Amino acid sequence: MSGHWQDQREGGGRRALWLIRQLALRGGRTLAGLALYPIALYFLLRRADERAASRDYLGRVFGRPATLRQVYRHFHCFAATLLDRIFLLARGERDFAFEIEGLAELERRIAQGRGVLLVGSHQGSFEALRVLGARRPDLPLRIVLDKQKTPELTAMLEALAPELAASVVDISRGGNAATLALAEACREGAMVALLADRGRGHEVLRQAPFLGQPAPFPVGPWLLARTLGAPVMLCFGLYLGGNRYRLVFEPFAERIEIPRGAAREPALDALLARYAARLEHHARALPYNWFNFYDFWRQDQHAPPRPGPGRADA
């Protein structure tokens, strides 16, 4: 079974990504979409750990052992959303049909002028958030990413949309620098988006119920939310098949409050449980949108060693 997600190698390589990019932009979505079938099959056959993780996750969702066909569909869905990132960045939303839920709630919080923290997960396409940014160019959007995890893919996407680099807050630079950048963004009334379902190697994790068993979730995003003091909404860019996506915004908290002392841990557990419950809701509704291809329920057991004294917090 797959170990910690940070130990997984990046799929493909520079030449493979270049080829996919050329095929997509020159051949269009139809031709590129046909190429996804052998590509998904290739990775299904070559990536045994990811295959096992998919089978484990799907078995939890369906309540029975997943078939190889279902695992293949899971791989193909992931490949489709990656391909769509190319078109979203190169051409915007013109090739897609988007449904947006919860927009009025989001705009109400934007109007407060304190910024909005959008907390998502590795479900569907987080890139779909850029559609909202394109529709509201007056509202800055900052996306928190670890650019060192997939450097080749990140370089390709930034080449497609050079302005992308300016909107990304690279968490690999270190926690303090990222926190300062995000605090400034909130003061400017920006939307700040991050993913909160994966813990990096040095992060503190706590258990929350998820698909029938406790799973470890990072507490860092919620401590950051408390520091920023902005309204928090959950966001999901769910893939519906073909060229269809559903962008969902759900109110979560007007402000994250985490007390000190003995009440701190129960407060964190309550936040994580609420977040995990919404992830489970969407996972059961659209099972093939979940893209954590590693042993999610034991990720804390596979985590790299935490930095010792005198080492930078990566």
Image (cartoon, grey):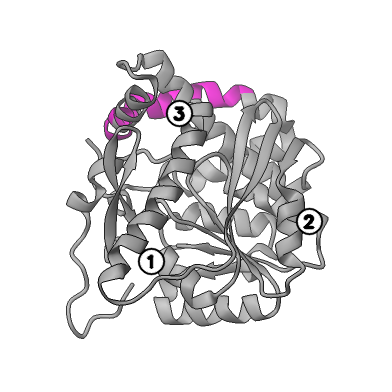
Q: Residue at x 35, y 33 (%)?
A: 211
Q: Callout 1: 10 Å neighbours few (<14), some, many (20+)?
A: some
Label 3: element kind? helix
Q: Mark 2 points at which residue?
A: 134
Residue sitting nearer the eye, 68 or 204 = 204
Q: Name the residue under label 1.
A: 220
Does the rendering let one see residue 208? yes
Residue 286 image offset from top left, x and y in percent = 53, 28
Alpha carbons under labels 1 and 2: distance apart: 29 Å
Tag 3: residue type?
Answer: Phe
> What secondary structure prevails in the magenta region?
helix
Q: Callout 2: 10 Å neighbours few (<14), some, many (20+)?
A: some
Q: Name the residue under label 3.
A: 75
Above-or-below relation of 163 to 120: below
**Which of pointers 2 and 3 indicates the residue nearer the eye?**
2
Q: Magenta stretch: give its range.
A: 34-52
Residue sitting nearer the eye, 224 or 179 = 224
Tag 2: residue type?
Answer: Ala
Q: Callout 3: 10 Å neighbours few (<14), some, many (20+)?
A: many
Tag 1: residue type?
Answer: Gly
Specify whether residue 45 is painted magenta: yes
Does residue 274 appear to the left or right of 27 in the view shown?
left
Label 1: element kind? helix
Residue 97 image offset from top left, x and y in percent = 77, 34
* Quarter of the image with the N terminus in it: top left
Residue sitting nearer the eye, 265 or 88 = 265
Specify whether residue 42 is painted magenta: yes
* Quarter of the image with the C terminus in it: bottom left
Q: Which residue is drawn at 21% across and 59% down?
A: 304
Does residue 170 appear to the left or right of 202 in the view shown?
right
**In the rendering, which numbered label is found on residue 137?**
none
